[in-house]
Image (cartoon, rainbow, N blue to C red):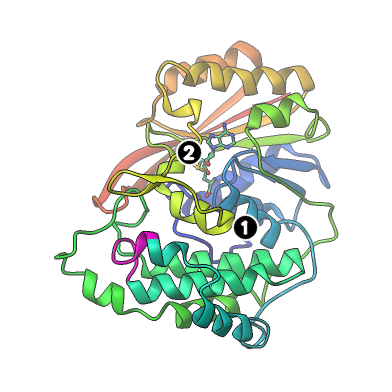
């Protein structure tokens, strides 16, 4: 199974690939096209890359950066040595002139130490000076990945640790640059195929409405399960890739333009699922869904919705220990629902 080291991401499916990929393969023709319509960390898209043409979409721009770096087939790779050569001059320039200083001014001694914030700003500035957009995406992925290693948080960016927390000192002492260079070396090995893979960054409704994915054979749907908005948990990564100096609010310094997904609301979730299920039925596209028994829409309701539109619906049940990002592990049952034409 193809796997790569990516960001720490709530709900990522790296430990469920052995179930999800066979389910997708069971309904998709050889050389077919699969759309991972809410791809997050992109681990599922990447695992499909040696078998199918892959379209990867997510509303969040950090996820789009990952898709461009590792899903779209290009022939660029990076290493720590290439980073030293391509970025060093502009990193030093930013240290002297502070062209980019948003992290230093906004997040010092919260999610990161002052020194880590200064390093983030300077590396980000140097990346912005790179002309090749693929190399830019690879370096941004390495930087996001390094930030996920040193972050002073419970594992996501919805909150930072209090200053007296026992883990703060070792975390804030970590050398972000060293972690960044280590991560650059990881991306010297990316699997390339000859397929015309695509990356999108939009609300899934627009992707459906505008005909971008009419030709796909299978959609894989891994929507948010809970009421927690991904835009709140990963606002720091969004700001890193956009670097647009946003207005931030609350103690946790959230951006004020965060996307609110309908899958996180009890009142909206059924209609969101219906939109995709109905689209797949009308366009004769197979649909594979990941969901759990601890989610906003009760699993029985989701099953019934699938059966309303598809005659062939299969359910696979997997007992799974799910990390609650800082609050230990919880036993849940994961479901893979396969609707085929
Ligand atoms: C459970 S995560 C996906 C995890 C992914 N399969 C992985 O392994 O990393 C759900 C994703 O849905 C995205 N999302 C939520 N609402 C969306 C929408 N309306 N359109 C597109 N993406 C959306 C979130 O940004 C998040 O990345």
Ligand 1 falls in quadrant: top right
Q: Position of residue 268 (x, y in %)?
A: 47, 18
Question: What residue sits right under mark 2 in the picture?
Answer: 258
Q: Position of residue 202 (x, y in %)?
A: 65, 37
Q: What residue is drawn where x is 72% and y is 27%?
A: 208
What quarter of the picture does the N terminus occupy?
Answer: bottom right
- The image position of residue 327, as x and y in percent, is 24, 50
Judge left or right: residue 31 versus residue 15: right
**Is residue 318 found inside the magenta-colored segment of the image?**
no
Magenta region: which residues?
106-113
* Residue sitting at x 38%, y 33%: 226
Q: Principal SS element in the magenta part? A: loop
Numbered circle sitting on residue 163: none
Q: Residue under circle 1?
A: 66
Badge 2: how crowded within 10 Å, few (<14), some, or many (20+)? some
Q: Residue 8 appears at what percent x and percent y?
A: 44, 58
Which quadrant, please, contains the C terminus?
top right
The one of 311 and 80 positioned closer to us in this rendering: 80
Classify mark 1: helix, strand or loop. helix
- Judge whether residue 91 can be spotted in this image: yes
At 37% across and 70% down in the image, what residue appears?
A: 150
Find residue 186 and report its image quarter: bottom right
Marked residue nearer the N-terminal end (1 or 2)? 1
Q: Residues within 10 Å of mark 1 (few under 14, many from 20)?
A: many
Residue 182: tell me if it is visible.
no
Tell me if 286 is positioned left or right of 305 in this view. Answer: right
Q: Is 152 above or below relative to 181?
A: above
């Amino acid at each position: 199974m193809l796997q790569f080291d990516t960001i720490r991401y709530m709900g990522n499916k790296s430990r469920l690939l052995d179930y999800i990929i066979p389910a997708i393969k069971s309904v998709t023709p050889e050389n077919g096209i699969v759309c991972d319509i809410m791809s997050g960390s992109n681990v599922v898209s990447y695992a499909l890359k040696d078998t199918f043409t892959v379209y990867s979409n997510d509303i969040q721009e950090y996820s789009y950066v990952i898709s461009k770096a590792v899903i779209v087939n290009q022939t660029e790779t990076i290493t720590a040595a290439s980073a030293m050569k391509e970025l060093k001059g502009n990193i030093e320039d930013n240290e002297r002139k502070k062209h980019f200083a948003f992290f230093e001014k906004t997040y010092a001694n919260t999610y990161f130490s002052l020194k880590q914030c200064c390093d983030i700003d300077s590396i980000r500035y140097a990346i912005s000076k790179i002309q090749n957009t693929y190399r830019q995406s690879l370096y941004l992925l390495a930087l996001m990945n390094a930030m996920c290693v040193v972050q002073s948080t419970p594992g996501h960016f919805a909150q930072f640790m209090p200053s007296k927390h026992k883990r703060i000192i070792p975390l804030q002492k970590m050398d972000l640059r060293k972690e960044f260079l280590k991560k650059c070396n990881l991306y010297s090995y990316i699997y390339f195929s000859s397929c015309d893979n695509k990356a999108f960054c939009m609300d899934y409704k627009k992707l459906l409405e505008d005909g971008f994915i009419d030709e796909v054979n299978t959609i894989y749907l891994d929507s948010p399960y809970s009421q927690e908005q991904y835009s709140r948990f990963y606002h720091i990564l969004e700001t890193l890739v956009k670097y647009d100096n946003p207005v931030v609010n609350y103690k946790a310094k959230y951006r004020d333009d965060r996307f609110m997904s309908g899958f996180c609301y009890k009142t909206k979730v059924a209609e969101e699922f219906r939109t995709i299920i109905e689209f797949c039925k009308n366009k004769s596209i197979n649909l594979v869904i990941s969901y759990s028994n601890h989610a906003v829409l009760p699993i029985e309701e989701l099953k019934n919705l699938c059966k309303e539109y598809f005659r062939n619906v299969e359910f696979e049940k997997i007992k799974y220990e799910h990390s609650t990002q800082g609050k230990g592990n919880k036993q849940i049952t994961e479901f893979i629902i396969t609707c085929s034409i």
